[in-house]
Structure formats: C-alpha cells, structure tokens
Image (tube, rainbow, N blue to C red):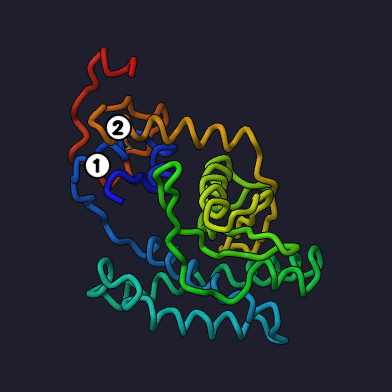
C-alpha cells in the first residue's frame, strides 16, 4: 500500500499544499505539545462516549466521569506523542475542557430535541476501534471516526475538536467526510449519500448530504497530491497557517516557475 495516499493528506493540503510536500519528503514534524493540543485530544476521546451522556440523568457528572476516564487512557492511546507529558499540562488541558462542559451539555440536549434519543444514539453509537479502509480503485486510505448504519445503509461520522460553524459544516470537513464516504462505499458496496460531523467541543451533531461537487473535488485533490508525492513542490496556500506549522523550520525553498504549471 506504499503508493496509497491518505485522507489526512487531503485535510493537510487544504490547510497548505506544502505541508503534504514536506510530509512526503519525510521531514519529521516539529510538534510543540501545548495544553490546547492536549485538550483537543481529550475532547476527541470523550466524544466517542457521548452516547453515555445522552442516556444520563446527570449529564454534567457524566462529563466529569468521561474526562477522568480519558485522562487515564490518553498516554496509552497517544504514547508516541505524550508519554512523558508534564502532569500540570494535563491539568491545564482538563480545565480547558471543563470550561466547555456547559456548552457540550446544551449541545447534546439540543441534539436530543432535534433528532430524538433513538436516532441520536444511531448517529453517535458507542465507539468501535476506527477501521482503516482502503480503496484499491483510487489508491487511498483513511479511517472514519465511526461507521454508522442509517436507515439500513452504511454511513460514517467524523469528530472535529475545533470551532463549529453557525450552521452546516466547514468546507474542509465536507471534503474529508466525502473522501471517507468514497472509502466506505467501496468497502460496503453501497452508495453513501449522507454522513455526520460531530463538533465535540459543543456537543453539536450535524447530519449532511454527500454532494456530487465534493466527490469531484476529492478526485481533483487526490490527483494534485499524487504529483506532490512524486516530488513537485507546490505553492504555499495564500493564508497558510505558518505560525503554527510543524514544518516551518524546513519551509524556506521557493517553487520554480515550471512547477506551478504541473
Ligand atoms: S510553513 Fe507555511 S508555507 Fe510552509 S508548509 Fe507550513 S503552512 Fe505551508
């Protein structure tokens, strides 16, 4: 599967195409672990268990229980990144997560009202280990955060830990969801026409249609990523997030004029 690209490459490409280039040049990312980064990991792990919050009569207590549980699990799950992390940083991250408890609780209660308890539980079922799916047709791979069965048809969800839009889902989330939907289709032999994005910081669950225009975009982006993988240095994104980029130490080279045409 060496020639396969990853759905996470598409996500990175949308942030800045050069990040994909440096990843394939095997530059080791220089990640600085911050308490906010740890908080986002905690929120993601908690979201896998939000079904328990839906069913609980004391949602605030249940959130505290989930947080305690994932704090213990985190070093084992992310052992490559945070094994020796300072306990004070974990504590700071936990406080950041606790500050969102009210929003998470309200978001989950609104989701119960919107979908009803049973459908909501179908949208956020208790977590199974994320499967890695492969497309032999298009040579890419990825892991949905959950595989779902909605109305008897395979579907999927992704969990995001950043901010949520007022309505709908962010463009980059739509592209990621669509790429993963294509993988689920190939592995389930059925058409995936909808998916779910969970904004775990707010307890918001958004159910969306998979659009043809986004499928087309995924195919175009995969073609561009393949060229980068084969050595083309792309232009940086106009609003590239350089300040927080794990490759900023390496990113000094300019692309050639010729490279812009391929
Ligand atoms: S430093 Fe900036 S331009 Fe370079 S890869 Fe990172 S985000 Fe892109």
Q: Decide which of tag 2 and tag 1 comes sooner along the chain.
A: 1
**Residue 131 appears at what percent x and percent y?**
46, 65
**Residue 256 appears at what percent x and percent y?**
23, 17
In the rendered image, is residue 96 in sight? no
Q: Which quarter of the figure is the C terminus placed in?
A: top left
Tell me if mark 2 has few (under 14), some (14-19) or many (20+) residues whose alpha carbon lies within 10 angstroms of its own: many
Q: Name the residue under label 2.
A: 228
Q: Nearer the viewer, residue 104 or 53?
A: 53
Residues at circles 2 and 1 in contact by the CB criterion of under 8 Å: yes
Taking the image in four quarters, ligand 1 sits in the one at top left
Q: Where is 245 relative to 93, above or below?
A: above
Q: Determine the secondary structure under disc 1.
A: helix
The residue at 46%/72% (across/down) is: 129
Q: Where is 92 relative to 7, above or below?
A: below
**Residue 137 appears at what percent x and percent y?**
45, 43
Q: Name the residue under label 1.
A: 24
Left or right of 59 in this view: 238: left
**Residue 167 appears at what percent x and percent y?**
70, 47
In the rendered image, is residue 206 in sight? yes
Tell me if mark 1 has few (under 14), some (14-19) or many (20+) residues whose alpha carbon lies within 10 angstroms of its own: some
Q: Which of 227 and 134 is in front in this view?
A: 134
């Amino acid at each position: 599967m060496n020639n396969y690209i990853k759905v996470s490459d598409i996500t990175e490409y949308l942030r800045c195409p050069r990040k994909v280039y440096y990843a394939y040049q095997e530059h080791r990312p220089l990640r600085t672990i911050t308490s906010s980064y740890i908080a986002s990991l905690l929120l993601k792990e908690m979201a896998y268990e939000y079904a328990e919050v839906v069913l609980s009569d004391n949602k605030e207590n249940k959130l505290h229980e989930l947080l305690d549980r994932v704090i213990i699990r985190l070093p084992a799950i992310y052992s490559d990144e945070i094994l020796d992390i300072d306990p004070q940083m974990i504590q700071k991250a936990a406080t950041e997560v606790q500050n969102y408890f009210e929003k998470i609780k309200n978001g989950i209660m609104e989701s119960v009202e919107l979908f009803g308890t049973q459908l909501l539980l179908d949208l956020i079922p208790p977590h199974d280990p994320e499967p890695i799916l492969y497309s032999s047709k298009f040579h890419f791979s990825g892991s949905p955060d959950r595989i779902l069965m909605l109305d008897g048809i395979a579907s999927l969800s992704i969990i995001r830990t950043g901010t949520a839009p007022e309505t709908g889902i962010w463009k980059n989330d739509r592209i990621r969801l669509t790429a993963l939907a294509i993988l689920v289709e190939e592995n389930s032999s059925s058409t995936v026409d909808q998916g779910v994005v969970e904004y775990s910081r707010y307890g918001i669950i958004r159910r969306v249609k998979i659009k043809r225009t986004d499928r087309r975009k995924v195919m175009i982006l995969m073609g561009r990523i393949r060229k980068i993988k084969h050595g083309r240095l792309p232009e940086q994104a106009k609003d590239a997030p350089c300040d927080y980029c794990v490759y900023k130490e390496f990113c000094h080279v300019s692309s050639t004029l010729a490279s812009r045409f391929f």
